[in-house]
Structures are given as structure tokens and as C-alpha cells.
Amino acid sequence: MLVTLMALVAVLGQKLLGPTTSSSATRVLDWGQYTPFTPIPSEIPPSTPRGCRLTFGLILSRHGARYATKGMAEGEYHPLFNKIRSSVSEFGRGFEFLRGFEPASETDRLTELGMREMVDSGRAFSRRYRRLGTDVFVRASGSERVVMSARNFTSGFYDGTKMKRKTSEDDDDEDEDFIVIPEREGFNNTLDHQGCTAFEEGPAADLGSSMRMPWLRIWATPIRERLNRNLPGANLSLVETVYFMDQCPFNSVIDPDAEPSEFCGLFSPEEWRGYGYYQSLGKWYGYGNGNPLGPTQGVGYVNELIARLTGRPVQDHTTTNSTLDSDPKTFPLDRALYADFSHDNTMMSVYAALGLYNATAELPLNRRLSPDEADGYSAAWAVPFAGRMYVEKMTCGRGADELVRILVNDRVVPLQGCGADKLGRCSLTAFVDSLAFARDGGRWGTCFAET
């Protein structure tokens, strides 16, 4: 997969990097949350520090690369290209392929690339934490692409450990060896935000869209003008310009070999950086630190994480499922390895509840910040396809306190608010103390307040 991703980057005139390269003067493919997984450069070495021993490893992962969602495909993409085909008779140079182009009819499911991403992820997790054994406790949120991601991850994990995957006598039920948490109204699920009415239906629900509109007008206006010159009669809007650009990542990740789509070369590297920033604004103000209720949607998961790190029962009154979390069969506290599978939006809220990007100032709406300038934040760096957070505990010397460290896509994220050392780590006690926002329930009390 590395070769094909390098081909994608080459098309954009960018450079693919290894995980330990300094991030100054480097670039990673930036298609926002539609970026295929790539290790992010880390200023702090991501390897286990010399003299330290890992005692705990957890992964929270987004699903792998997928087809467009049904809502976007049927509601936006197909109508857009139907309009282009019916209204444009003369196509500009390089745009001729659009005469016969139709968006993929498949929706929502993992692509072949997405499946491979998750197998690779399982193997990588196995290699990193091989000294912690071969027994990983797995949970997945209940959408098909997330469940399939968990399956492919576990396949890669057990392949990496050279151990047979644990199954029941009924091998036809592929879900029996991990927990699937339903995604439906009224069912508490820390891996899928949906329980806070004020967040889902109130003013906070539209913040991600509204806050990126100023940047859309600045960045996309000249692109729209150029597209309309090459597609006379199409009269694309600014939002349709974004939907047009979406076809580059979606038609690249659906190719079995991840060959770059013809759409990709229609835009310059600077235009793609603007696209990535547009998507980053949407995630930041929609689900992350920039939304007053964004961090609260991740509080339940953080309280589950605290329970796993400390071996103590979950203390939470937000999105946790008390039936599942009180049963050691569905929420054990004695494992060394855990793997959870979710969506990009919920992961943004978890990152916010953990305070991972508290050093990042509010993102400006009238100019673009690079990930370096945003203290390590962008949608591509935080929640790409198959994006992942590792939480690990380690001991470094006899009698020493346990230390906690977090990596996001192989980049060590220095912990905030707990006195992190030069390697980005905090003691377990200080780390848990720093999570007072989550332990106190965030702003959950405002979720159902009458307005």
C-alpha cells in the first residue's frame, strides 16, 4: 500500500513521510477525513523509550476507507454529475473524462483498500504490543463498515501473533468474539455520538457547517470560477465545488490498487491544502474543541478509558451503557490489550474530552493554518481513514510510577494539563486527575435543558 500512497502524493507534488521524521518542512497527503491512513511525523520518537516496559495498550480506531455514504452519493454526488452531463457539451482540456463519469453506485461499505488498511492496522498493533500477549478485547460500534473494520483488524492481529483467532463452535457467526454495540436511538454507545439532544438538534448541530463558510468563500471561489470556465453551462456553486473535489479521494480509495483518480490532477497542491483545511474546520467546530458541546460527546468513552487504566469500575452518567459496563464479560477491567472501533466524528469528541488538542488555538476562519501551526491538528492528521489513537501505560525502572502516553496515527501527542515530561508522558495519577472535565460529566447537564 505504501507504493500506491506514494503515487497519490506524487500526483499532488507532495512528499510522504515516515513516522519518525520531524514535521518541519514536511507534508502529508491532505484530503481531510478522506485521507488514507499514513503515519504522521512525530517530533518525539514513537518507539518505546529505552529502559521502559509497556504494561497496557489500547487502540481507538476509525473504520477503514469506504465508499461515499448513501446520503451524500444519492443526495449530492449523483445529482451533481447528472447536471454536468446534461448541461455541458464542451469540456475543457483534462475534463473530457467527465462525459461518461458516474459516481460509484456502491455506498457506505469498506473498499478493498479499507479492508487492507484494517488488516495492516491489526498487524501493526500486534507488533507494537506483542509482549503483552495475544488476548485483545474488542468492541465495535454497530454500523457495517465499523464491524467489518473490527473483523479485518482482528484477522491482522492474530495473523501477526501467529495465534489462532478465538471463536465459538459456531464459526458462521463472525461477531461472537467481540462486542458489537448497536447504533440506535435510546441505546447508550460511547463509540457513536447520538445521545445529547442539544448537540444533535440544537444550534451546536450546525456549527461545523456554518463556521467553515467564510473559508469556503475565500478558498473555493477561484476554484469554482476555473471549473465553470472548463465546464460551461454547469454553473457550479461553492458547495458543489467541494463535492466535485470529493471525487478525488473517493474515486482513489475505491480502486483496489489505490490508483489516483483523474479528479486529483485537476487541482494544485495549494488547492488541496485549502480543501484539507476546509474539512479540518468542519471537524473542529462540529465535533471537537471548537464546539461547546463537542468534548462532552467523548466524556463517556474517556471515563471507560479511566476505568481500564486504573482497573476500577466505570463512573459515568453520560453515554456509557451501564448494563454492558458493569458486566466483566462485556467490559473486563483485567486485560492488557483493548481495541475499539468507531467513527471520525465521535473520535474527534473523544480527543477533545481528553484535551489532546488543548494547545491548539481556535482555528481562524479567514486563513489556513498548517498542522504544524495548529500544534499538530488537522482532520488528516487526526481522523483519516483507519485513523487510530494508541493509549499505553509503561513502567521505567523498578518501583517507578506507571506512565501514560498517547499517540495519534503514530505521532506522540504530548499530554496536556498533567505535567508531561519531555517524552510527552504523565504519571497515571496525574493523567487521571487532569481529566476532571470527563470525570465530572462535561456539560452533559445541558444536553436536555429546555431552551
Image: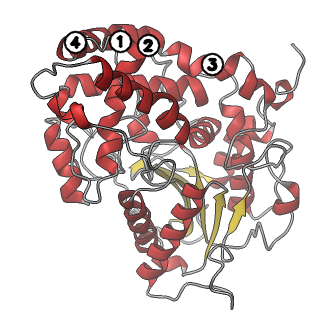
Q: From this viewpoint, which residue is outermost toward the left?
A: 93
Amino acid type for the residue under numbered disc 1: Arg
Mark nearer the viewer, 4 or 1:
4
In the rendered structure, which disc, 2 or 4, sits on the residue that comes first in sequence?
A: 4
Measured in 3D between alpha carbons, the distance from the residue under mark 2 to the one under mark 3, in whole angstroms, is 18 Å
* The C terminus - image quarter: top right
Give me the disc on residue 206: 3
x, y percent for residue 67: 44, 47
Please state if 68 lies on the left or on the right of 205 as rendered.
Answer: left
Image quadrant assignment for residue 174: bottom right
The colouring scheme, among rainbow, by chain, secondary structure or one colour, is secondary structure
Residue 144: x percent and y percent? 59, 57
Q: Considering only order in the chain, which callout, 3 or 1, is on the residue closer to the N terminus?
A: 3
Looking at numbered disc 3 in the image, what kind of residue is underneath it?
Asp
Residue 126, image x and y in percent? Answer: 45, 73
- Quarter of the image that includes the N terminus: bottom left
Residue 8 location, x and y as percent? Answer: 20, 45
Q: Earlier in the sequence, mark 2 or mark 3?
A: 3
Sequence-earlier tag: 4 or 1: 4
Mark 1 is surrounded, within 10 Å at the Cα level, by few (under 14), some (14 to 19) or many (20 or more) other residues, namely: few
Q: Check if mark 2's residue and mark 4's residue have beta carbons within 8 Å.
A: no
Q: Under tag 4, what secondary structure?
A: loop
Residue 227 visible at all: yes
Residues under numbered marks 1 and 2 in contact, where contact means CB atoms less than 8 Å apart: yes
